[in-house]
Image (cartoon, helix red, strand yellow):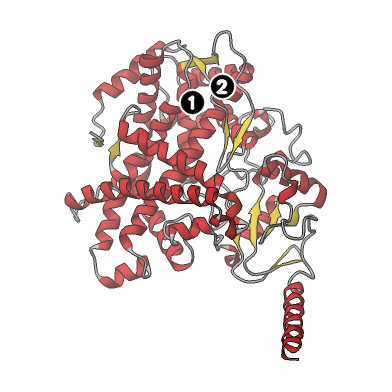
Amino acid sequence: MLTGFLLGLAIIVMCLMIMIVSLDYINCPPTVPGHFIMGIIPKITKEFHLMLYDYSRRYGSIFRIHMGMQTMVVISDPNLIRQAFRNRDLTARPKNDFSTLLNGFGIINSQGNLWKSHRHFLSNNRLGMQDWQSGLSAARQIIEFEGSRLLDVISREFGPTPTDPEEVLNSCVANVICSLVMSTRFDHKDKKFKDFMNNFDEGFRLFNKTGASLFFPFVKLLPGVRSTYNKLKDNREVMRAFAREIIDKHSKNLDPENPKDLIDHYLIKMGGKQEAIDALFHGFDPQEQLEQVILDLFSAGVETIKVSLLWSIIYLTRNPDVQKKVQAELDSVVGSERNVAIDDLPELTYTKATIFETLRRSSVVPLGTTHVTNRTVQLNGYTIPKNTQVIPLLHSVHMNPDVWDEPEAFRPERFLSEDGSQVIKPSSFMPFSVGQRMCLGDQLAEKEFLFFFASLFHAFNICPAQGQELPSLAINAGATVRPNAFKVQFVPRQKEALVHARNNVMESDVPFQSSD
């Protein structure tokens, strides 16, 4: 009797729960049908962002998917993405095993007051750039030196030998962040630096392998997944140890009257009054927060620019006519007797259009940054319940044939005015996302990408390795969309520029310490 009553009560409660949950979905976006437990997971037969693109063509600019225990709303219309991500109720981040591993620390995965205060702190300090004259002077000094070093390394060490450019690009891009954040530079052959960057790559690979646990948390208990998850935890501890070592060195040499970089500014705050500490860290451990901020800045500031540069080399190798137009503009603006300078960048309209086309065509971060609703919100006439993940499908934004004529074609002219004198940035172009969680260093990243790109193609003709096929457009999709490894030849075309690059490296008094 009692058993029957309890069973009936359980059924009633379950029905009520289903009804309550269903109320949130009465006015939901179009839903992609899927398995009642697995959702669309069994349908995944190709890269996830490409599958979502196909769905966007079928179900429209806003639709809903289920993946295991997760509900996600995908947006592919740029105006809707802007509308959504300007909403303060859409600034939360997903809660999953990875965010649990980070314990809410950092800038990428932090939330609430911690995220707001540190984004404000980083913005006010311009990522450490204010300590070198002005922010622009700091960026100029650092980027121009690394550009000279990039040309010098390629010229002296690689010559005409077919070369995989990733390692040296990695070093130069990383050194911009290193210089601003920790006043330290690394040689591309430095073992500590190579181990650090390899650990970053390993962390991305391990994270991708644990993907199933994001949708089915119990999967983490399976032996193979548990082993990978434990390796991911170990990887994070190794990365934190590297950051901790840098912080300790700064602590020993800290001069509160003369902060030299971003870490110094953090340490000054951490050594100040308790009220100031509480206002910045909100009860989170300051040391661990600083460690994760450093790692987040590397994660966001190195991988995307490096991968974008790799794609730019591939696209211009496959489109030699574009390469010649870029070089003609560089020769006209820069000439043959010096290197590209930051001051040249505003004059490089076709070159800038070419990097915009690279960013559009490659969409290195095709799913942008996943947001989560803090509470139930209305968007485009639809109801999106609290705790729903919202994905900006940037790949679809950049590859929509209704917006971009022949989107598969590589055509920089689409970013130029009719007379070719001005660069146009349409509203449907958002490589750094938009809204309150958009890339914090988007202006620095764009300047850095343009300068390294212009420096490379001013100094070298870049062509396929002799006797080999063109670099492939095949992708390796994970945290970013990377190309397959490839080799190209760097053939000197402006020898005076390479001499100047060598002299700049030899004579520079850049005030950064070697990692040695």
Extreme residue in the top direction: 467
Q: Residue at x 70, y 54 (%)?
A: 74
User: Residue 141's x, y, as percent?
Assistant: 33, 35
Q: Residue at x 44, y 47 (%)?
A: 231
Q: Secondary structure at mark 2?
A: helix
Q: Is residue 465 left or right of residue 393?
A: left
Quadrant for residue 505, please give it: top left
User: Residue 347's x, y, as percent?
Assistant: 51, 29
User: Residue 298's x, y, as percent?
Assistant: 41, 44
Q: Secondary structure at mark 1?
A: helix
**Front in this rendered view, residue 507 or 303:** 303
Quadrant for residue 390, please give it: bottom right
**Front in this rendered view, residue 457 or 309:** 309
The earlier-in-sequence mark between 2 and 1 is: 2
Q: Residue at x 45, y 10 (%)?
A: 160
Residue under numbered circle 1: 454
Identify whether 353 is placed above or below 2: above
Q: How crowded is the residue under tag 1: few (<14 C-alpha within 10 Å), some, or many (20+)?
A: many
User: Residue 447's x, y, as percent?
Assistant: 47, 37
**Front in this rendered view, residue 323 or 250:** 250
Q: Are marks 2 and 1 in contact (CB under 8 Å)?
A: yes
**Front in this rendered view, residue 60 or 495:** 60
Residue 119 visible to the viewer? yes
Residue 373 circle label: none
Look at label 1 and name its amino acid. Ala
Residue under numbered circle 2: 326
